Amino acid sequence: MFKYTLRRLIQAIPTLIGISMFAYLLMGLSPGGPVKALTFDPKMRPEQRERLALQLGVNDPIPVQYLRWLLGDTWMRWDSDGDGVSDGSFLIPIDANNDGVPEPPGTRQGVLRGDWGRSIFEKRPVADIIRERVPATLELGISSLLLGLFLGVPIGVLAAVRRGGWFDSITRITAVLFNAVPVFWLGLILILVFGSWLRLLPMGSRCPSTLTGGCPPITQRLEYLILPTFVLATGGIAVYSRYMRASMLDVIGQDYIRTAKAKGLSGRQVWFTHGARNALIPVATFLGPSVAGLLGGAPITETIFSWPGLGRVGVSSVLQKDYNVVMAVVILGAVATIIGYLISDILYALIDPRIRFS
Amino acid sequence: MTAQTQDIINLSIKGQVEVGESLTTLALRRLRRDKLTIVALIVVATLVMLSVCAPLIERYVLHVDYTRTDISKAFLPMFADGHILGTDDLGRDHLARLLYAGQISLGIAFTAAILSLVIGISLGIITGYYGGVLDDVIMWFISTLNSIPSFFLLLIVSAAIITNPDLNNTFLKGPFALVAFLGLLGWTGTTRLVRGETLSLREREFIISARAVGASPIRVMFIHIMPNLLSIVVITLALDIGSLILVESALSFLGLGVQAPLASWGNMLTNSQSFFNKGVHLVIVPGLMIVVTVLCLYVIGDGVRDAVDPMTVDK
């Protein structure tokens, strides 16, 4: 199993490189880069604009920019401070302005060395932004995952037990409906009903705004969590209940369920102790990708509810062409997806011994 | 003989199916009896018809001009001043705009679904049939594409092309670009499905005999294998159109899809948070259109799946 995991991880490397190149290329090739967006200010002089472009390195060919993003600039010769003079690198020290002192090399370390670069708009390291946003995203993601599981699984079991009954029909229709409702519209309607009309719940954000910008512990602001959690959980509720129902129906046909019934166990014991436990196996394997999906954030839900998470910062950065932030969010999401699938494959084989790693 | 026919013969031996019916006849008969699917089909057909006839309805039934703005008539309630669904923030007739938006939303979803289906089926058949290096490369490409958080991929492409203020190309900024990139990014699921099916069909007797009599690979793939994929195609098409309507509406809602003044059900909801107090119907109706359409398409997909599944036992 160790060998299998290692091989899958090694296979992920070209995938990740492919993703980063693809995303970088897409953003880099589109006309009007971050400089254009930054220099909306009509008072800005052309030479200032030029200097900014040099500093950001957007005049270089895309492959060079990509390499700088990936590997940093301490090793390459280029003008990192935009003063029109090439800097040295730690490989080739140069003295461009002949003052006897070699120019200092650039300071970027590159993604491979853990440096995600700086946000062009917020003018601070991308890593700080990500670190700030992760708790909010995890908070919303975990609560909606839990809600999806705790509602979806029992609903699936009950629907299977009462197969063909009214509960089965209602939950089936609800599941299809949850899949057909656009997330953003569901969010809007809930804000309209509970926030605007009934004034029961806040209309968005993570907590009441404070002077320090921080949020109190989660238990003191649960009302802010209710609507976004529910909206984000609808997909999960639909999927888990349907899969749980199908898997439960599979289990019900097994011999050991008949044995349990023949032993004279109560219906509840048969269904939950013998049935649901085994029916959970295929559902458990969904958890890997779901947990991983959390890290990508929920762009739409977070935007609707002004939730300060990764998804929302991703959306705004795409619009502002803040390349470094977008790349960080995309790569983070991709890494999480790859690891999620790996975990689910391993989990599957661990739970079901009939499956072999190959 | 396909496994499906074999299944039908097995069922007919048990007396559950009348002998002498083809799979298509059987499926059509089941479909006719499935009332829910029929209703869904009628609803979708009606919506398509209404959208296609939007210019006629606008002119001869509603007597309005959906592009004419009139601030003095903004936020009229329903049935006021001859506007059945009232007016929007710029005083435009909401119902007429809804119909035109249907043209865009349905049109984009239908064409993008067909585009992704064509790519998906061709690549799926080819990789499934030939296998080898080609299969490895395409499968790697698919897994790479699928590892990128999909909505961000759409956001990046859209921000780079459709909403880019520095790109002066009307074609690239119009709805056709949206069709192209939704189609070009959405084929991976179909490819996987078709590839799997092709892998199993490839080993069947009728394919081996077709090859034995000297049929070219192209002929085997597209004359012998493809007809067997028909049911998958119909189901995928219905489900794809549904999910594409959802994706397009989400993008347009964020301002990254269909651009104003062109209306789509998604971009009619942009900024609708500010209409809460002035016109609630502006928030509710476009969303309902999306829900009803997508719901009906999913029901159709499910209904077709049940109808063509030989294991479904007739009541």
Image (cartoon, helix red, strand yellow):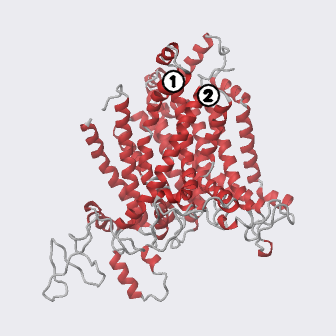
Give the residue number, with chain letter if any, for mark 1. Answer: A269
- Considering every residue shown, the one lying at the far front of the view is A220
Q: Residues within 10 Å of mark 2 (few under 14, many from 20)?
A: many
Report whether B15 appears left or right of B32: left
Q: Chain letter of disc 1?
A: A
**Residue at left offset 52%, top offset 33%:** A244
- Dot 1 lies on which element? helix
Of the pair A212 and A356, the residue shown nearer to us? A212
Report whether B249 appears left or right of A311: right
Q: Which x, y percent locates residue A330?
A: 41, 58
Between label 1 and label 2, give the one nearer the viewer. 1
Rendered position, B118 above or below B96 = above
- Dot 2 lies on which element? helix
Give the residue number, with chain letter if any, for mark 2. Answer: B308
Residue type highlighted by circle 1: Gln
Rendered position, B278 above or below A302 = below
Of the pair B93 and B108, the residue shown nearer to us? B93
Q: Which x, y percent locates residue B253?
A: 60, 61
Q: Which x, y percent locates residue B208?
A: 44, 23
The quarter in which the C terminus of chain A is drawn is top left
Of the pair A69 and B282, the residue shown nearer to us? B282
Of the pair B255 and B185, the residue shown nearer to us? B255
**Residue at left offset 58%, top offset 28%:** A160
* Rendered image quadrant of residue B92: bottom right
User: Is residue A224 visible to the viewer in this orientation of the structure?
Assistant: yes
Q: How many marks?
A: 2
* Rendered image quadrant of residue B89: bottom right
Q: Chain letter of disc 2?
A: B
Q: Which x, y percent locates residue A129?
A: 39, 66
Q: Residues within 10 Å of mark 1 (few under 14, many from 20)?
A: some
Residue type highlighted by circle 2: Val
